[in-house]
Amino acid sequence: MGLSEKEECVLLDQKLLVFMDQLELLEEKRERLNSLIEQGWFSMSKARYSMGNKQVSALQYGSEMEPLVRVHTRTLESGEAEFQTKRRTLKSPQERQVEDIGPKDKEGVRRRVKTQEVPEIDQSDNKHPLTETEPAPSSKPEANPQQDPLKWFGILVPQTLKQAQASFKQVVELSAEVATLQSAVLTTRQQLQMKQKSSSQTPDLTD
């Protein structure tokens, strides 16, 4: 048995109230987002003024970079799209050094064992074991793509540059919330339009 006209009106009113609440919340988050963007650019402009334009530019970017924040999306049963941010934790140099040294030590042990098992060869022959001709691992320091972006501009950076980074970090988090809420608003509006069409086409069965 279908819903009566009164029940349809109540559901339509509830959906309308939800829609208005979502619009109000979306407007608040958008204002907060714009304020953070302006604050971030203003802090960066002050950092450029104190350090120099050439000291805070794309020229200081790292040669290798990895994203510190990733955005995960999924579609809910209601049809809404949900956006979530996941920030990667920066590892200290000691932790990265331990991870890099472990496998190399084991490989070095295996190589030493192999060289001990190789029989002696006459020095008059210009032949050497393969292990002796292998190139030594390069000791050149590798670039760290997980480095804090603030380190690109120097060790002692001004407080304004740190404030700019903090503002843009909040912008990333808030952008995901705004995108999720925007998807919810669109889905609610579609549901509201469908209910309005169905209620206008449904004949009055109460008579």
Image (cartoon, grey):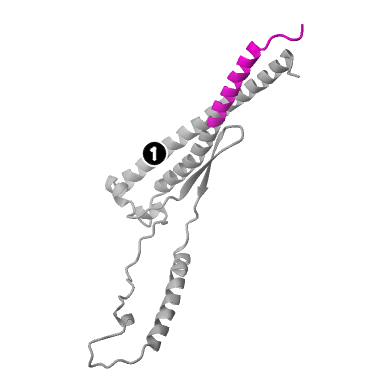
> For the point 63% across and 19% down, which residue is it?
195
The residue nearer to you, when weighing 114 against 31, is: 114
Please tell me whether residue 138 belongs to the stretch shown in magenta: no
* Residue 183: % across, % down: 53, 31
Kindly identify which residue carries mark 1. 41
Task: Assign the C terminus to one quadrant of the image.
Answer: top right
Q: Amino acid at mark 1?
A: Trp
Crowdedness of circle 1 by 10 Å Cα count: few (<14), some, many (20+)? some
Magenta segment, which residues? 183-207
> For the point 25% across and 86% down, which residue is it?
127
* Residue 86: % across, % down: 52, 48
Task: Give the farthest residue toward the top.
Answer: 207
Query: Is residue 35 visible in the rendered structure shown here?
Result: yes
> For the point 44% across and 42% down, which residue is it?
168
The residue nearer to you, when weighing 166 against 87, is: 87
Q: Secondary structure at mark 1?
A: helix
204 w.r.t. 183: above or below = above
